[in-house]
Amino acid sequence: MLLPLYAFAVGLTACGLAGSAMEIICGRQLAFAEPYVSPAHILRSLAATACAGPFMLTNDALAARREGRIGTMALLSCGCTAMAWALALGVVLITIASWATGLLGSAEFLA
């Protein structure tokens, strides 16, 4: 039970850091809209969505709820999706870190 909780914390932290940095740089609230997601810049949009997607989804869901476009069940569904997304992001980041550490640890440095 501790490992999934750790992965969730890693994903949530990475998502928060990436999302906050993107908001500071662009000066706009994070959302699935310009300048963060754009059909003209597919790779940049994919990277932004992969890293800060749970933050984007939460912001959009809360804005839609305030405007009355979605109900409570849809908001809860978005919240559960954002949590699962943060967990998956954490698993991916831990796997990448583990893989990179293994590569660095197995390298032999010749003097």
Image: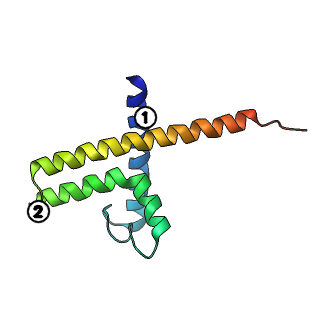
Q: Give the residue at x 17% y 50%.
A: 75
Classify residue 49 by image quadrant. bottom left
- Please name whichever residue, 21 or 107, is drawn nearer the observer in this view of the structure: 107
User: Nearer the viewer's eye, disc 2 or disc 1?
Assistant: 1
x then y, percent, for residue 27? 36, 66
Image spot of residue 56 (x, y percent): 32, 56
Q: Is residue 56 above or below residue 72?
A: below
Question: For mark 2, what is the residue?
Answer: 67
Query: Which callout, 2 or 1, points at the residue further toward the start of the chain?
Result: 1
User: What x and y, as percent, mark residue 37?
Assistant: 38, 67
Q: Secondary structure at mark 2?
A: loop
Q: Which residue is mark 1?
A: 7
- Which mark identifies residue 52? none
Q: Count neighbours of disc 1 (C-alpha within 10 A) and say few if under 14, some if 14 to 19, many if 20 or more.
A: many
| Label 1: which secondary element | helix
Identify the residue at horizontal 44%, vertical 61% (top origin).
46
Q: Residues within 10 Å of mark 2 (few under 14, many from 20)?
A: few
Q: Residue at x 51, y 37 (%)?
A: 94
| Spot occupied by residue 100 in the image (x, y as percentages of width and height) | 64, 40
Which of the image's four quarters has the C terminus? top right
Q: CA distance from mark 2 to mark 1?
A: 33 Å
Q: Is residue 10 left or right of residue 97?
A: left
Identity of the amino acid at label 2? Glu
